[in-house]
Amino acid sequence: MRDVAAEAGVSFKTVSRVVNGEGGVSPKLVTKVEAAVAQLGYRPDQRARLLRRSISAPTTIGFVLVDVANIFFSNLLRGIEEVAMSRQCLVLAGSTEGVVERERQLVETFVERRVAGLIVVSWGAAADTLRSEVMRGTPVVFVDAEPEIPDLDIDVVRSDHRAGAIAATRHLLAHGHTDVAYFGDDPAIFSARLRLAGFRWAMADAGLSVGSEREVTGSHSHQEWTDIIDRYLASTLLPTAIFTAQNFVTLGAVRALHHRGLRDVIAHVGFDDIDLADAVTPGVSLVPQDPRDLGRRAALQLFRRLDGELGPAVRQIIASEVIARGSGEIRATT
Amino acid sequence: MRDVAAEAGVSFKTVSRVVNGEGGVSPKLVTKVEAAVAQLGYRPDQRARLLRRSISAPTTIGFVLVDVANIFFSNLLRGIEEVAMSRQCLVLAGSTEGVVERERQLVETFVERRVAGLIVVSWGAAADTLRSEVMRGTPVVFVDAEPEIPDLDIDVVRSDHRAGAIAATRHLLAHGHTDVAYFGDDPAIFSARLRLAGFRWAMADAGLSVGSEREVTGSHSHQEWTDIIDRYLASTLLPTAIFTAQNFVTLGAVRALHHRGLRDVIAHVGFDDIDLADAVTPGVSLVPQDPRDLGRRAALQLFRRLDGELGPAVRQIIASEVIARGSGEIRATT
DNA sequence: CTGAAAGCGCTTACAG
DNA sequence: CTGAAAGCGCTTACAG
């Protein structure tokens, strides 16, 4: 800015005025300054600018997610970005990779950058930091997961994991199955816990008991899930139906069922959408989520708070139903 | 910081020392300050900190991409993030959605935030801004695309789009096909242009001519591609093989081939990996890319420059071969 | 071991 | 219409 002022032969205050289009500057000087700006390739330093500015429109929001490479989270990010962009706001995103400690680190890093607001797929690991930030007035929205944090009431946007799992399980029961196996993420994960709970509830509600060998959980890539389910299907006493509670698990199951030649034998319903669900044979029946929409909703809620909306925390729990495509409608063979 | 100093009853310089772990502070004061920090939930403002700091480790890099919701770009981002994280660096990412003008906007916004470096999937739209930034010493790496910008020599990391397309086309030719249709992204896109060029070259090299009705291009979602290819397959004079030059196009083609009952009739090779490529029947033969690896390479190259490495621009052009899974090995029926 | 001064690049009041 | 001063929240020299 100093250089530009020197180049244009004016005080740097005048440069500031031109750059900000404040007016009250003679056209002659404006031209001069603009020429200098262009020549030196000058771009104002937003950090310094925001440092001094008292009230400023939000310029950056932070998004803590688990893994951008997972299509669920990348669509969540896309939805958030879409809303943020329309408000001239950037999104700082960071993956925790499921490492609980990284959630706290990322939240702290974002806070130190003075993001205007935070959207977090939280395990509750950043509870203390989030609490002090919320006290200070930084809005926070939880998305996908809804950790219980004492003394902290936070807006949340998520799918109704439990109801979705119940719908999926009942869909299988309705087709005559009584021996259903569950494959899902580590129950330490909020959404996975609720989906497992939904599965158990629906089975119990139908008067069916579920052996522990019918619940396989853990956090794995879809390649790993392919192997795990493939081995499971090689064992004796096969279930007549399976419920896979997450997109990676569903991908693994489709591969394994195809590999074992059981795709027309064992019924299968998944949670989360996958590409080509309608192109494989049979089509994969599943309970879809719309992550992009969830992201949009979370961001809109965040901006509402940034715009000054007060009031108690808002919970948006989005329900979803089974889309029947074939795999979930295979009847039990008795 | 002022409040913390008051709370602890020391000068704010002492607080600064404690927060930065500079040492040379009596244990008694350290304890006091730490208590005050904890009580007030104080977090240093990185923006102010970086403003004053003369030499500082890179803290943020910017990544301009086309669409995070596309699995190719989200994996690119993941690879970049992985490397950035290991250097305590955050990634600001923004989607252009294919709008050329947004590339310039995003680059400028990032520059104004004083990102340490930039990784760009560029159309060349931000040429002027990039040039002045590079002059100023901000390292830039192009990934996936390699626009020609006069007077600007920039590091690039990308797949060998042309060679991959040639390999895919020849794979089909080797199975007896002479009538191959091409479906791909808008040739205004760098990678799409090179893939189309590769297809044409391979056909011409084999002495085959390609009618204009055998080249279908445009930027569409995979739902749209499904419809486009589905309609194409309903017309007369079907090709005996198709080459789909991008992941969305490949997804659309698989759906359309299945829908039309032509999946065992028309040979198909794609560019880019897709989920379930090995689970559909027949498996989808394709030329994979490893976007996460491309992202890692781009970020490593950027950090090398940030670490002070000089020298001419480095071009990493990654080759790839056809993975045969069935769809590409269907022989031409004469 | 601790503090008062100057400055990072800008903006927000105040004068002229 | 233009500029000299003070300050945003911090750090980097310099004193005591």
Image (cartoon, coloured by chain):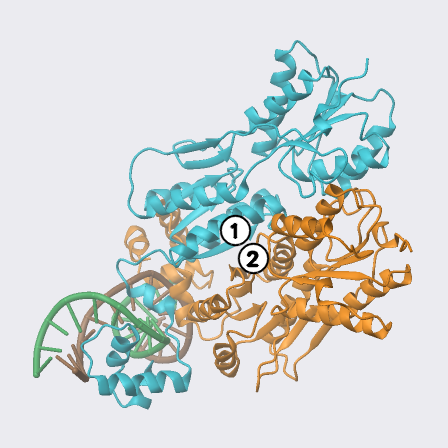
Chain colours: A orange, B cyan, C brown, D green
Mark 1: give few (<14), some (14-19) or many (20+) Cα within 10 Å. Answer: many
Residue shown at the point (61%, 76%) measured from the top left: A147
Residue B230 visible in the picture: yes
Residue B197 visible in the picture: no
**Badge 2 and badge 1 both on one subunit:** no
Q: In the rendered structure, find residue A83 and report the number of the disc placed on it.
A: none
Q: Is residue B17 above or below residue A172?
A: below
Describe the element under mark 1 as helix, strand or loop.
helix
Which sits in the foreground, B186 or A101? A101
Position of B179 with respect to B314 (left or right) is right
Q: Is residue A7 above or below residue B194?
A: below
Q: In the rendered structure, find residue A67 and report the number of the disc placed on it.
A: 2
Describe the element under mark 2 as helix, strand or loop.
loop
Where residue B75 sits: x, y (%)? 56, 47
Where residue A128 sits: x, y (%)? 49, 80
Q: If the image is split into quadrants, where does the C terminus of chain A sit?
A: bottom right
Chain of residue at mark 2: A
* Residue located beneath label 1 in the image: B78
Position of B47 with respect to B14 (left or right) is right
Give the quadrant of residue B12: bottom left
